Amino acid sequence: MQKRRKMIRKKTYSVKSRIVSALRKVWRYSPLKKEVYYRNLVAKRSREIDYTYKCEKCDFIGIKSEFNIDHVIPVVGLEGMTTWDDYILRLFCATDKTLKQFNSQNLMLLCTTCHDVKTQEESKIRKLNKKFIDKDPTNSVKLNKRK
């Protein structure tokens, strides 16, 4: 009897995913993130791990690990990926194209539940836009802003 060998499928190399990953890694250390956390700080404790924060959408209060920082204007627009310049400007919340001025007002602190709901909503709209844009490039679906 011959043993069957499992076919190992090699992952294809994607330059786009590598670039996105590197940009996200750089953004992880952005001072804007710290600014957003301090903006939503409710109570300080003896250690920073025990600080409590408040969700900007549902007013949930919890510790840092229960929150995500989210972009108000999505990094990947609702119409999908456009250009790398747009992606970088939105990711770093730049107010000008020289990347010298930044604004943390495009960032909000959300509890994981609110963040998941917002992300799913945006994904659905992106999928709808992709279907409509494939058929007719002038159509697009807009996000209903609720607070």
Image: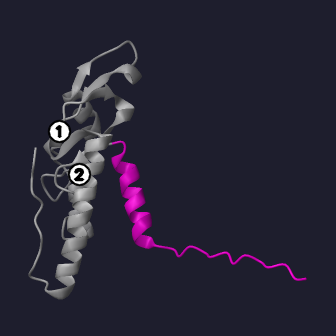
Q: Pointer 1 and pointer 2: residues touching (CB < 8 Å)?
A: yes
Residue 82 seen in render? no
Give the farthest residue toward the right: 1
Helix, strand or loop at mark 2: helix
Task: For the N terminus, give its image quadrant.
Answer: bottom right
Which range of residues does the magenta coloring cover? 1-29
- Amino acid identity at mark 1: Lys
Q: Is residue 80 above or below residue 70?
A: below
Quadrant of the image occupied by residue 82: bottom left
Quadrant of the image occupied by residue 67: top left
In reply to whether residue 27 is colored magenta, the answer given is yes
Query: Which circle marks residue 57 in the picture?
Result: 1
Badge 1, how many Cα within 10 Å: few under 14, some, many 20+?
some
Of 13 and 96, which appears nearest the observer?
13
In reply to whether residue 61 is colored magenta, the answer given is no
Helix, strand or loop at mark 1: loop
Of 12 and 114, which appears nearest the observer?
114
Tell me residue 20's x, y (percent): 37, 62
Q: In the visual, does 3 lie left or right of 95?
A: right
Tell me residue 114's x, y (percent): 25, 43
Give the farthest residue toward the top: 46
- Amino acid identity at mark 2: Lys
Tell me residue 41's x, y (percent): 24, 24
Task: For the C terminus, give its image quadrant.
Answer: top left
Q: Earlier in the sequence, mark 1 or mark 2?
A: 1
Residue visible at 77% across and 78% down? 5
Render colour scheme: one colour
Quote the CA–CA distance across marks 1 and 2.
10 Å
Q: Mark 2 sits on what residue?
A: 118
